[in-house]
Image (cartoon, rainbow, N blue to C red):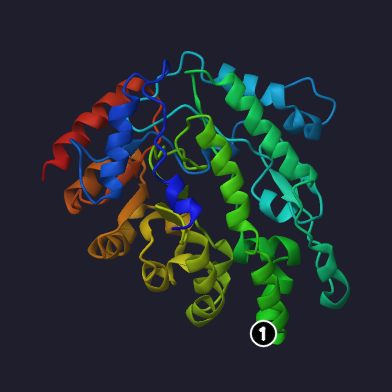
């Protein structure tokens, strides 16, 4: 049996947290959801997708890059940010070592620029004949080493106050997108599919190695497995596969290029939630759900014409019919209508709230609905 399967038997040493006394019960509720069951009530996260990209933190660093790279500051700032907070329902105090969403692409070369709440990667493949040699994965890469350092420092400082994630990693199609750029990669699928395939392969070659390294570090510290979605998995390997670039390609091209990557990406994981970011990605739902390791879906329906969520109920029901869990980003004003028309099985609700009083009321409503 390969070593990574043996690692899934290592249980988290975390019992309860000083910041979340009901930690174990909430973790059990998340695991029940993964298994297609409901433990007392449907799980709830009081959070809205991408909220973390809306709040900047002032500091006295000379540059934003200095701020992002200051490992002590990042861990201490997170600890300050959770002081006095209540983590109701399936909200957990979790710190994610972070240099932005294209960190995995940057491990292979290139540079990034930093803003208050995110970073941007500069594409490096302008000409396949001359530029493919620029892609060289290295553990000595500045961004790889920084994320390892951020992880180590956070693990030293967390105590029983917070958990530590492994970083946000995007291999495969989205890694190739970062290296090549949107317009160029779309044109490649029409005019240069051979080189596009080379780029997709390069984007997945080192993913499991990178994942295993970070997984080993957090497991050695007794941490459960978690990624940016902040759902602790005490016994297993958690991953959020995604392919936002698939929004722009046909179902046939996704099956040819994306599906083999997805199968490789999730094969050693025990808990996979595919991040379906919008209607374009949802075009590939049958291919995504054909992979048995993908046990759950995160449905991000978007805003503007894609709002409200009530127009997407048939899609949610379809995922439920395949006996998969689904995370639903639900506005609190839509909660009552949603519960009237939907069955609770397989649901995980994400709801943005403004007060603990709102959260208590929502939990009572959802508990009653969960008994339907």
* Number of numbered markers: 1
Q: Quadrant of residue 209?
A: bottom right
Q: Is residue 366 left or right of residue 132?
A: left
Q: Report whether residue 220 is seen.
A: yes
Q: Quadrant of residue 60?
A: top right
Q: Nearer the viewer, residue 59 or 261?
A: 261
Q: Quadrant of residue 257?
A: bottom right
Q: Is residue 257 left or right of residue 10?
A: right
The residue under the point 65% across, 80% down is: 189
Q: Position of residue 115 (x, y in %)?
A: 73, 39
Q: Quadrant of the N terminus?
A: bottom left
Q: Nearer the viewer, residue 225 or 323?
A: 225
Extreme residue toward the right, this view: 130
Q: Is residue 105 left or right of residue 300?
A: right
Q: Nearer the viewer, residue 24 or 191?
A: 24
The residue under the point 84% across, 68% down is: 133
**Where 280 sits versus 155, above or below?**
below
Q: Position of residue 168 (x, y in %)?
A: 59, 46
Extreme residue toward the left, this view: 372
The residue under the point 38% across, 61% down is: 293
Q: Position of residue 343 (x, y in %)?
A: 18, 52
Q: Secondary structure at mark 1?
A: helix
**Where 30 sits versus 103, above or below?**
above
**Where 57 sits versus 119, above or below?**
above
**Mark 1 Cα-neighbour bin, 10 Å: few <14, some 14–19, many ≥20:** few
Extreme residue toward the front, this view: 1
Q: Nearer the viewer, residue 123 or 10?
A: 10
Q: Quadrant of the C terminus?
A: top left
Residue with the mark numbered 1:
190
Q: Is residue 144 left or right of residue 312?
A: right
Q: Report whether residue 240 is seen.
A: no
């Amino acid at each position: 049996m390969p070593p990574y399967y043996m690692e899934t038997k290592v249980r988290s040493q975390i019992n309860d947290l000083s910041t979340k006394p009901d930690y174990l019960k909430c973790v059990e509720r998340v695991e029940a959801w993964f298994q297609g069951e409901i433990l007392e009530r449907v799980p709830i996260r009081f959070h809205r997708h991408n909220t973390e990209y809306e709040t900047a933190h002032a500091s006295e660093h000379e540059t934003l890059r200095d701020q992002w790279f200051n490992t002590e500051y990042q861990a201490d700032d997170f600890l300050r940010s959770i002081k006095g907070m209540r983590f109701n329902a399936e909200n957990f105090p979790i710190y994610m070592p972070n240099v932005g969403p294209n960190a995995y692409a940057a491990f292979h070369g290139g540079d990034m620029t930093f803003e208050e709440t995110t970073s941007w990667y500069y594409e490096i493949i302008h000409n396949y004949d001359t530029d493919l040699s620029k892609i060289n994965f290295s553990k000595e890469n500045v961004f790889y080493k920084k994320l390892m350092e951020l992880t180590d420092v956070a693990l030293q400082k967390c105590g029983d106050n917070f958990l530590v994630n492994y970083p946000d990693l995007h291999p495969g199609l989205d890694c190739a997108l970062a290296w090549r750029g949107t317009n160029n990669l779309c044109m490649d699928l029409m005019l240069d599919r051979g080189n596009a395939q080379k780029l997709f392969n390069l984007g997945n070659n080192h993913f499991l190695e990178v994942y295993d390294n970070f997984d080993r570090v957090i497991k050695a510290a007794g941490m459960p497995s978690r990624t940016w979605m902040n759902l602790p998995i005490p016994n297993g390997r958690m991953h959020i596969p995604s392919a936002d670039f698939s929004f722009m390609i046909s179902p046939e091209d996704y099956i040819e290029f994306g599906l083999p990557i997805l199968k490789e990406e999730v094969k050693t994981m025990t808990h996979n939630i595919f991040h379906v970011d919008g209607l374009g990605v949802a075009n590939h739902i049958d291919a995504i759900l054909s992979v048995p390791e993908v046990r759950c879906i995160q449905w991000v329906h978007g805003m503007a014409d894609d709002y409200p969520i009530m127009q997407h109920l048939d899609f949610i029901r379809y995922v439920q019919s395949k006996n998969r869990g689904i995370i639903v980003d639900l506005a609190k004003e839509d909660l009552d209508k949603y519960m009237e028309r939907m069955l609770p099985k397989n649901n995980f609700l994400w709801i943005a709230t403004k007060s603990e009083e709102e959260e208590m009321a929502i939990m009572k409503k959802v508990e009653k609905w969960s008994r339907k």
